[in-house]
Amino acid sequence: MEAKSDKLATLDIVLDGLMRRYKERVPDVGTILNAMVHTGIVNNVDEIENDHIAFRTMGVPQLGVRSFEKIFLHYGYEKRDHYFFEGKKLDAWWYSPPRETDPRIFVSELRVGDLSEEVQRIIRSYTDEVTSDPADSLDLDNGAEVDAFLHKPLWRTPTVSDYQTLLKESEYAAWVIYNRYYLNHFTISVHNLPEGYNTVADFNVFLEKNGIKLNTSGGKVKESPDGGLLQSSTVAEMLDAEFANGEKLRISGSYVEFAERKVLPAFKDIPAEQIQRKHRRDGFEAGNADKIFESTYSTQTGKS
């Protein structure tokens, strides 16, 4: 038991570090959380349930999901379903958490070998700087070390020229080459919020009243075919980024997502106050995720 509690304490350090830096990098996070407190939806931000956090990786031998997942499997996460996004040339998996209070994790990986030779060459010119699996050299029981790793560049800062070449063929590739393992987004669970805010549709109204711009790809509310998972997301803000040789360019940052998980039919008669995470629709939905990926894409960020 001691070892398990130690691992969970380390996981807390890692998750806290991720969220702290993410809030610093994504101004919408503070805007939304402060508005939720100010409106009285929650008394403080600690009451907000984090449905899942997501990361983007490069599918090259020494990196990608096989490397990245070692960190969270160590803390008790369990690998679940695989998803394939043909148009975006991505594989993804989700991981269930060790505690009900922890976020699920969603990790996607670019199928580098499916891209043009020129784009593959550019990507590998950066990722080849990582000569061995970096997760293997981490002390996974040292929360501060893992936290630092998840925010440390793994290769040199790209040139504007390389970034723009990638952008034309794969906006995902461009995002990852610049951002590396930075947390891509976190997700507010809305189904446990008070009446009037506990559906994605209602919460979207609250967000737009507070000046938040929503991703419209596939509609503002993305719904799974079974109707059990509804999601929406903000549009990533454009950030002034510094590239190699001191060049600057406005690029896409990260975004915030919102999820509504319906109670499963088998549990529909359970009193509302007794409903737990295990009673709700779990997992993810490829159709929803496909549209939410576009929160960082120019089709969304380029709209005024």
Image (cartoon, rainbow, N blue to C red):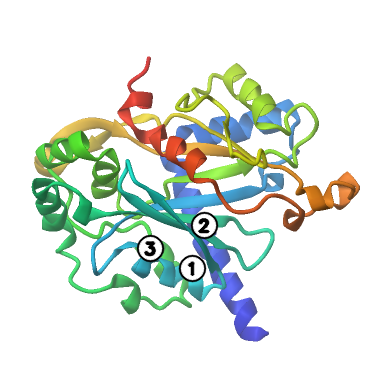
Label 1: which residue? Answer: 72
Determine the image quadrant of residue 67.
bottom left
Question: Residue lying farthest top?
Answer: 304
Front residue of this view, candidates 57 and 92:
92
Q: Residue 93: x, y in percent? A: 46, 58
Residue at 36% x, 69% y: name it: 66
Nearest to the observer: residue 100 or residue 47: 100
Is residue 233 left or right of 175 when viewed as pictured? right
Q: Can you say which quadrant of the picture contains the C terminus?
A: top left
Residue 171 image position (x, y, % from top left): 27, 38
Q: Amino acid at mark 3?
A: Ala
Q: Nearer the viewer, residue 46 or 199?
A: 199
Residue ID for mark 2: 105
How far from the left and from the top, in percent, is residue 68? Answer: 38, 65
- Mark 1: amino acid: Phe
* 295 shown above or below 207: below
Q: Residue at horizontal 37%, vertical 63%?
A: 65
| Residue 294: % across, % down | 39, 34
Residue 116 located left or right of residue 259: left
The mark that comes first in sequence, 3 or 1, is: 1
Mark 3 sits on what residue?
A: 148
CA separation in Å, label 3 and label 1: 15 Å
Q: Which badge, 2 or 3, is on the more N-terminal residue?
A: 2
